[in-house]
Each structure stands twice: as C-alpha cells, then as structure tokens.
Image (cartoon, helix red, strand yellow):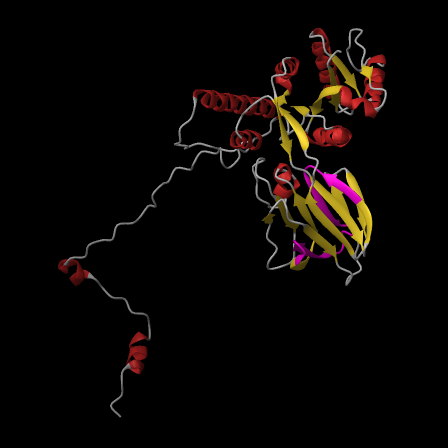
Amino acid sequence: MSRRILILAHTGRQEAMQSALQAIELLREAGLTPVMMPHDATVVHEAIHNGVLSADGLTVESLNTESTLHDVELGMVLGGDGSVLRAAEMVRESDLPLMAVNLGHVGFLAEAEQADLDRAVAAVVNRDYLVEERMAIDVKVLVGTHLVAHTWALNEASVEKSNRERMLEVVVGVDDRPISSFGCDGVVMATPTGSTAYAFSGGGPIVWPEVQAMLMVPLSAHALFARPLVVSPESVISVDVLQRTNESGVLWCDGRRTVDLPAGARIEVTRSTSPVKLARVSMTPFSERLVRKFDLPTEGWRGTITESDRAAIEARERTRRDQDNWHQTLANSQGIRIVEPHHMAPRPEVVPPVTTPIPVVTKADEEEIVQVRRPGADEHDREKEPRDD
C-alpha cells in the first residue's frame, strides 16, 4: 500500500498553494501519494484552472471523507502558526503527526522554512523525523451546574470582554480555591506551546515545551495582585465571570473557536488527555529557536559553542545583514531614512564635559581686587549690624 501524506496549505495565499504543488510533485517523484482535504483540493484545482497557479498538468488527489485520515502517515502544513492550529483542529481525532513548513512570519511551530522545503520532503520520504507530543488543554464552560460547551486548545484559551467600553469582572482560582478577583480585559490560560503566543504578548513567561505546566495570564488587570501564574499540569484553573456588573464575555480557543459567556459563567481548564503530535526534523535546542525566531541579540556570550551552532549563528547574522542591506537599498531608492533598532545601534561616544579651570589667586592679585558695592549697600549692611541697646 502506498504511503499517503496529507498536504495542508493556507489556501488563501498563492505562495502557500504553489509550495503545496511543489511538495506534491516531490512526494510523487519519491513514490508517495500526496492527498489534500476536499475543500483545499477544490481551491487548488480552481486556481490551476484559472491560471493563478502553475501546475504543468499536475493534479491533486482529494480525500473522500475526513474519516480516511487513519490511512495517512503524516500531515505537512504549509503556512504560519495559524495554519498549524487549523491543521491540528482538522486532524485532532486521528492522532496524525504534523510537520510544518513556515511561510508566515514567526513560525514558532514550524520545523523548516520555505527555502528548506526540499529537505523537509526528503525527511518525510526517508522517515527521518521524530514525533513529539505537545500538551493541549480541555476547556469547559458551565452556567450553574449545566455544561454549555466543551472544547480544547493547543496554544491557549482566553476569556475576554465582549464590550469594549467596560471591563470584565472576574475571579480566578486554582484547584477549587479562589486566588483573586479584579476587573480586566481578559485572562489567558495557556500551554507551554502557547507561552510564546498570546500569553507572551500579555506579559507571561516563556515555558520550554518539555515542561509540563499551565499558565494563567491576566490581561490589563486593574488590581494590585494580577501576576502571571504557572501551575501544575494536574491543576484545575477556573475563571468566573462575575454577575455584579452584568457584563458578558467571550471565550476564544486558539483564536479559532468561540463560546459566548453570560454573566455568571464559569470556565474550567485542565490538561487534555489528547496531546497534539508534531514531527521534528531538527534537534535544534529550544533556546536557539527562541533566539532565531525573536531575533534576539546574543553578543558577548562567553559559554562554549559547537561548530554547528557557530555556523548556524553566523548564517543567521549573514541573513540579518542581507535583510538590513536590502531594506536600506529599498529605503534609499524611496528617500526613506531607516532608524536602527536600539540593540543594533552603535553606542554613542562618551565625550567628557568641558570644564573651566579655576584660577589661582595670589597675594599680589588680592591687593589689586577692587570690590564694587551696589548703591545703598552700606546702609543695608549697617541695618544688619547688632545694636548695643
């Protein structure tokens, strides 16, 4: 039986669909059977028919139903982190591992960049990858004792205000114990995978993927104590929407699934028993990925470094310089002045202040000094003299 590889592309971007066709062609040349979801295949076929995509007679095989995913070996995601979250939602029930090729901006969940598509396909063909599990969270919404929604998230579940003019009044708790109540724009409950996403933007800590934990990050809270919390993966995080202001909220899961939250609703977040599987072709440490994705400055590092790491750092620096040169050339052509980021700007030269030397007064000079007194000074001084009476 031929090995089947699911291609999941961002069909709203021509670049992603063209990369999908390239991956399909490479997989077929290696004897594998690439397939696409029915909707994605229809969009790609229409783009080929309309001349938007160049396919050279290439056709795309469509899955009949999503239930056939158990026959698929792996899913290749072509897009950004949002495409990975969409793919995780589509394959969640099938336990299918996902390998992401970044065509977006940051691409924290991606294993390869667009320029490395050939290498990623070769890793799939040769089964040269490892599968790691990423923790997900289960999310329940209760009103009273009635369960009104049960969903999940790979990155985060966020409770947010639905009225821009008013704060959302909540009380947060851990393991059936209250922690604090406050007004806020929202509360983010995140996984370690999601710690570099919405929770990070809200001021939460970055948690290494292999750490088993859950995060709770208040958003713009009006409170003296509203700090991010890191709790055990076996804990239960709760957020209650208070009724005293009668304000409603909305629950967002991975920015894709929503649930309306009336006043009095309770949200409970626990560790999911169904993790998401990601296929990895690179064993790059998370710290290096963090530096590369966020373009962090590392000048002055004195620790040991391997030759491969040194080569990766030098390649990253060359890429940064090439990008800077390209942007500078473009700006010069349009008469725009580029201001460098603070961490890349040269330090200003420290110039010592100019001081006027204090003159040395000799005894001879003192004899030549003439004191000029303002008019009426004698009378003023006499008034200050003590009287004998």
Where residue 81 appears, as percent x and y from the top left, is 68, 30
Viewer-proximal residue among 54 and 324: 54
Q: Is residue 298 above or below residue 49?
A: below
Residue 139 % position (x, y): 74, 44
Question: Residue 17's image quarter?
Answer: top right
Q: Residue 21 in the image: x percent, y percent?
A: 74, 14
Q: Is residue 170 magenta?
A: yes
109 is within the stretch colored magenta = no
In the displayed orientation, state which residue is furthest to the left: 364
Between 367 and 37, the residue placed more toward the observer is 37
Asked which quadrant contains residue 208, the reply is top right
> Which residue is situated farthest in the bottom direction here?
389
| 389 shown above or below 6 | below
Tell me where residue 60 appears, x and y as whole percent: 80, 14
Magenta region: 150-177
Q: Is residue 210 left or right of residue 89?
A: left
Main SS type for the magenta part? Answer: strand
Residue at 25% from the left image edge and 66% from the top image edge: 371
Can residue 167 be seen from the camera position used here?
no
Query: On the picture, is 194 further left or further right than 168?
Result: left
Residue drawn 59% across the image and 53% down it: 227
Seen from the viewer's position, the closer of residues 309 and 370 is 309
- Asked if residue 132 shows in the view, the reply is yes
Quadrant of the rendering where the C terminus is positioned: bottom left
